[in-house]
Image (spheres, rainbow, N blue to C red):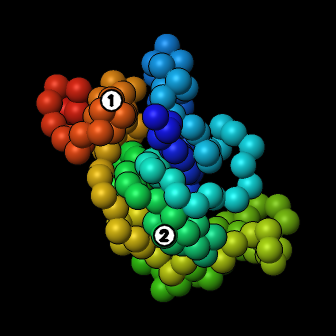
């Protein structure tokens, strides 16, 4: 039997969801026998591959690079899971939306010019510093999401429950004690 092709992606967020994924401890060894990790911040892959079975996507969609990658992921992935509260609701990265500023340039002006103590200037490096979107979005506002795995970060037990269901070929049911908050 072919191993499940799994990807994990980190967009605009803190990497806490990936840290929680690493908290799977010994279960990671079981996973290693059943999946092929084809893309992740924990492996050195430069291009998101074709024909991915499952992708856990962490973080909000904050900039043009995030949006482009989310679209590529959706086009190349069978099952997309919004992984953690930033992906599900935009959470902390979306605080920028509440500033009442009319566009991304205003946010940069506010942060890097008005409140700069040293070397005021907006960082610009074409091809290196991506353009901010006008507003931060949860993943499902950018692309279709199949499942939502909440938590900030989701506990390892919640991730394990989801992965066991996926590995068993079941449609994930995000319910029960392992998936409740608290």
Which residue appears farthest toward the bottom when viewing the image? 102
Residue 110 seen in render? no
- Lower sequence index among marks 1 and 2: 2
Which of the numbered marks, if any, corresponds to residue 164? 1
Residue 3 screen position, x and y as percent: 50, 36
- Horizontal side of 131 relative to 36 (left or right) equals right
Which residue appears farthest toward the left when viewing the image? 176
Residue 103 seen in render? yes
Q: Residue at x 23, y 26 (%)?
A: 178
Residue at mark 1 to residue at mark 2: CA–CA distance: 24 Å
Mark 1 closeness class: few <14, some 14–19, many ≥20 residues within 10 Å: few
In the displayed structure, 82 sits above or below 175; it is below
Which of the numbered marks, if any, corresponds to residue 122? none
Q: Secondary structure at mark 2?
A: helix
Instruction: Give the image quarter of residue 115.
Output: bottom right
Which of the numbered marks, if any, corresponds to residue 75? 2
Q: Residue at x 53, y 18 (%)?
A: 29
Q: Residue at x 52, y 58 (%)?
A: 51
Mark 2 closeness class: few <14, some 14–19, many ≥20 residues within 10 Å: some
Front in this rendered view, residue 133 or 7: 7
């Amino acid at each position: 039997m072919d191993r499940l092709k799994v990807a994990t992606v980190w967009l605009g967020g803190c990497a806490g969801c990936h840290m929680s994924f690493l908290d799977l401890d010994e279960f990671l060894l079981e996973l290693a026998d059943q999946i092929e990790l084809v893309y992740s911040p924990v492996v050195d892959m430069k291009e998101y591959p074709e024909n991915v079975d499952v992708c856990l996507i962490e973080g909000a969609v904050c900039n043009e690079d995030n949006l482009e990658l989310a679209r590529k992921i959706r086009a190349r992935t069978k099952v997309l899971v919004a992984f953690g509260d930033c992906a599900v609701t935009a959470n902390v990265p979306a605080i920028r939306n509440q500033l009442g500023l009319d566009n991304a340039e205003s946010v940069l002006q506010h942060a890097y010019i008005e409140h700069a103590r040293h070397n005021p200037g907006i960082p610009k490096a074409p091809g290196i510093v991506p353009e901010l979107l006008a507003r931060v979005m949860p993943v499902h506002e950018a692309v279709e999401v199949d499942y939502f795995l909440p938590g900030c970060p989701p506990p390892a037990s919640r991730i394990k429950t989801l992965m066991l269901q996926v590995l068993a070929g079941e449609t994930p049911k995000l319910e029960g004690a392992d998936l409740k908050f608290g």
